[in-house]
Image (cartoon, rainbow, N blue to C red):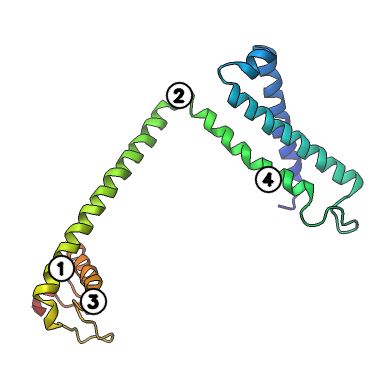
Amino acid sequence: PNWPGFEYIEFGFMMFFVFEMVVKLRLTGVRHHFLGPDMKWNWFDSAVVTMSLLDFSLWVYQKIVGFGTKDEPGLGPVSLMRVARLARLTRLIRLLRVLRLRMFKELILMVKGVVAGMRTLLWAMVMLLFIVYTGAVVVRQTIGPERISINDEYGTVLFSDLLWSMFMLFRIVMQDGVLPDGTPFAGRM
């Protein structure tokens, strides 16, 4: 973060964005640019570029005058420069505009598929939780009072309460039916 080359790379990106905005203004005209169908994005782009120019101006001013350095405290730890640098995070939102391009149609379809798949996965987890809960209640009512314990180093009791019964039943169903000490579950019944 202290490498001075970052500031020059950032200057290059800032000049690219300024050039992009100037070209768009020249091609579409000021009125259509700020009042047209994409006016919200264009106002946002203009605000980001303006903040970037302000940030660069403050950086140059800091280098020339030296406010906020060790020699001159200036504005202290919360300098205007640091506040202006927070505006850099808004540049990431510009990437959302790229997703509107036609060539990213498949990417958008994939993202929608993942979101739909997550919804399905959520309901599958709810159904599994319901099945494990029902099984734990049944096991707790039928086997639980006998307090089947395993003679391991932890003194594990198989179905001591409902949450532990759910956990043990989940382990038995998802694994190969082996208890924590390595013996099969059927041998303990």
Q: Position of residue 50 (x, y in %)?
A: 73, 31
Label 4: how many Cα within 10 Å (few below 14, some 14–19, many 20+): few
Query: Which residue matches tag 1?
Result: 137
- Label disc, if present, on residue 180 of the rendered structure: 3
**Which residue is rendered at x = 76% and y = 54% of the image?**
78
Q: Which residue is denoted by mark 4 in the rendering?
A: 86
Query: In the structure shown, which secondary structural element does the residue marked by tag 4 occupy?
Result: helix
Q: CA distance from mark 4 to mark 3?
A: 51 Å
Disc 1 marks which amino acid?
Answer: Val
Q: Nearer the viewer, mark 4 or mark 1?
A: 1
**Image disc number at residue 103:** 2
- Of mark 3 and mark 2, the one earlier in the sequence is 2
Q: Nearer the viewer, residue 121 or 136?
A: 136
Question: Is 174 in front, or is 46?
Answer: 46
Q: Earlier in the sequence, mark 4 or mark 1?
A: 4
In this rendering, the answer to whether 94 lies above or below 158 is above
> Does dot 1 land on a helix, a strand or a loop?
helix
Tag 2 secondary structure: helix
Foreground disc of the pair 3, 1? 1
Check disc 1: other Cα within 10 Å, few if <14, some if 14-19, many if 20+: some
